[in-house]
Image: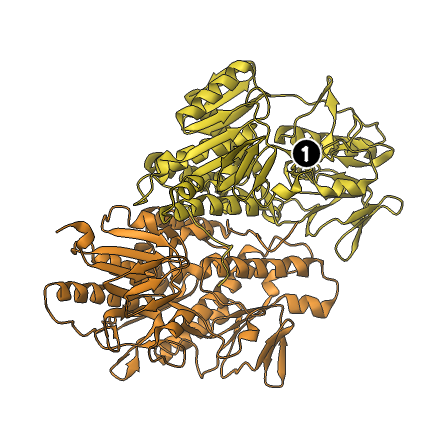
Chain colours: A orange, B yellow
Amino acid sequence: MESNQQPHVVIIGAGFGGLTCAQALRSAPVRITLLDRTNHHLFQPLLYQVAMAGLSPADIASPIRSILRRQSNVTVLLDEAKGIDYERQVVHLTKDELPYDYLVLATGGRTSYFGHDEWEPFAPGLKSLDDAVEIRRRVLLAFEAAEKEKDEARSRELMTFVVVGGGPTGVELAGSIGELTRRVLARDFRTIYPEFARILLLEGGARILPSFTEDLSASAERQLERLGVQVRKNAQVTNIDATGVYLGDVKIPAATVIWAAGVGATAFTQQLQAPLDRGGRVNIQPDLTLPARANVFAIGDMTHLEQDGQPLPGVSPVAMQMGQAVARNIQNALVGKLYEKFRYVDKGSMATIGRHAAIADVAGLKLSGLPAWLAWLGLHLFFLIGFRNRLSALFNWSWMYFTYQRGARLITGGRKD
Amino acid sequence: MESNQQPHVVIIGAGFGGLTCAQALRSAPVRITLLDRTNHHLFQPLLYQVAMAGLSPADIASPIRSILRRQSNVTVLLDEAKGIDYERQVVHLTKDELPYDYLVLATGGRTSYFGHDEWEPFAPGLKSLDDAVEIRRRVLLAFEAAEKEKDEARSRELMTFVVVGGGPTGVELAGSIGELTRRVLARDFRTIYPEFARILLLEGGARILPSFTEDLSASAERQLERLGVQVRKNAQVTNIDATGVYLGDVKIPAATVIWAAGVGATAFTQQLQAPLDRGGRVNIQPDLTLPARANVFAIGDMTHLEQDGQPLPGVSPVAMQMGQAVARNIQNALVGKLYEKFRYVDKGSMATIGRHAAIADVAGLKLSGLPAWLAWLGLHLFFLIGFRNRLSALFNWSWMYFTYQRGARLITGGRKD
């Protein structure tokens, strides 16, 4: 069979779902085009480390072309999907169009402000490398501004950091601000004491990390408090502006606010002419196709699929298993078999808080503190894509571990000459 | 003597000159304030490695606070000098003012377009980390655009890279574009052959690297050509726009142009009410003071000083030796001694072209090729400030050396969601 007559699989998005799907089709008799708006696959679970100056952007990102260099049935394309014409089976790009036989949508998630997009300038979210570098810039600049501030109230405001949202990302961010202030920056300033910075973690519900057991939530809270983070539960944010966060009538003056409370699907799902949930996620069929579109699949954070009455969580293991399932279904279709229904196998979850501080719930085993942290470290290093990144991240971590220094403490961008 | 009655030395700029001066005053009975617009000291000689995706920004930059953490007579301030009031002896900052007893100006250089600032958007220069990341973005994006371009002329334009200026920076940039295309990107694309990219180095004079001997210039040219770089001498650029570079009536169509032809002083010198040279550099006295200002010194790339009838070159050894001389002069003044005249001791110079390719002229010894490259590598690693950066850069270099991979190949910024 002539190669260009093989069925063409177009995958939009090279996150965990899209990349896994492309790799799982390695030996399939198909041509694959993998489309992404950036040139790199991002190891999102460690993005908070870039935001907190522990790792460099290059440590947690690999060029997509490098990852797939040896897989000859894939073409990587740096472009943006603008829409889909289902009748003609083409994806509209910035200039051209791309015909497909099978389409896999894996465009991921983005920060959602629950209808309050006006908060975004004051409380950036953390979804991309550019977000991480911007948050790093704001946190480090707050200390620099406090160092030369003479007004006491303003200085307190500059030394207050509020993280909104008590899920894994919020906990990681708050914990690592604690470490940054207490260990890394402590001796670097002459007029301020970074270790007395005020760090608040606001959670709207009754406990942080609600996807874990109550015991583990409580343990995480104690570990955060040891790092100087104040956890406030049942805290409903009603407004955010340049000067702080409002909880009803109460105002918390703060120069730096980070939003980790909501994730929704990328705006691209609006184009799909398909039913969406409240977060803009597309409701998919159990075989991962869009309703009434047998050759269009959607996977990962952009999708809404329930299993045992609960929506599947927006985490990388779900996206990766979905990517593999789609690859199997396409291969089934090529030999005339029916699609299989997807079933997620939960292998456990963990959240990290700081050095020696984490919680884990893996295979029925509930860990916290040092053992959980070691498990987290090993697993994340193992899954960091690209051997070089793994070595480099290991090097940076060991360095931070033994010296409490952080090498990536650069304030870049945002300044015009 | 009460510490806050000690003389106050204000140093503006934490480049090689300013930082060396602050460190040389380690044991002097003075209070020092070191002011910089960024929070990091930059190892500028390796900036081209960041632009060519060989190193990460954090590998060549150290937080100024960290470098000076243990020197208790220094306060580091992130702010910008807006002007100087010589009568009242204060530096105007963004909001406040800073009184001084001795003032050391070390604000460095910036890219100069010789009166053609309109070329800047089309041909960025390389002076800051932000510049390096921008050039990296343009070079990598050109290949991505070529990969999907169907028009042949436009594709050739995208695959043409022009470096203007045959000094050390231009040679380093052109050589490393050669390596990037031939070794790193070669196998990553499906429709283009990065190894056939056209790389032009334009030099206005009769030979590249004119500060070296003719033999070494010729050797550098041969080494560049081996990496696929075409060197054009006596090439006077008359215009640059979005589609390419003009040499009189001849146009070279090129999507990516990098400007390495001119360095002048930062705009700050305009504020000094002092005589400037054509490049905006301030003419200083042999004792490194400004004319008629006995307590105001200026050093490094922002200055013009002749020695044996030749202006001193704008390189880091000059700036560092000047920084040390100023520290000696201030200490002399404190004990009632006269200032000494500055004399630069040239310990040699080198320029690198690529892997195993360099030239060096050190202590009368003229090296080229592998020996020169090894000398260059050792010396630069030795001088890279901060032990961590040295280790991390060594790691990244070894990795590149053995695998021809580049870890920092990220396209970030410039995209709005």
Q: Residues within 10 Å of mark 1 (few under 14, many from 20)?
A: many
Q: Residue furthest front?
A: B249
Chain where mark 1 sits: B
Counting from the top left corner in percent of width and height, residue A326 is at 22, 66
* Extreme residue toward the left, this view: A336
- Residue B344 is left or right of residue B379, and the answer is right
User: To which residue does mark 1 refer?
Assistant: B301
User: Foreground: B150 or A139?
Assistant: B150
Measured along the vertical axis of the image, is residue A221 above or below residue B406?
below
Asked if one can make out residue A154 in the rendered structure from this viewpoint, the answer is: yes
Relative to residue A237, is residue B31 drawn left or right?
Answer: right
The amino acid on which the numbered mark 1 sits, given as a three-letter code, is Asp
- Residue A360 image point, x, y percent: 33, 69
Q: Which residue is the extreme one toward the right?
A: B87
Residue A347 appears in the rendering = no
Q: Position of residue A224 (x, y in %)?
A: 47, 70
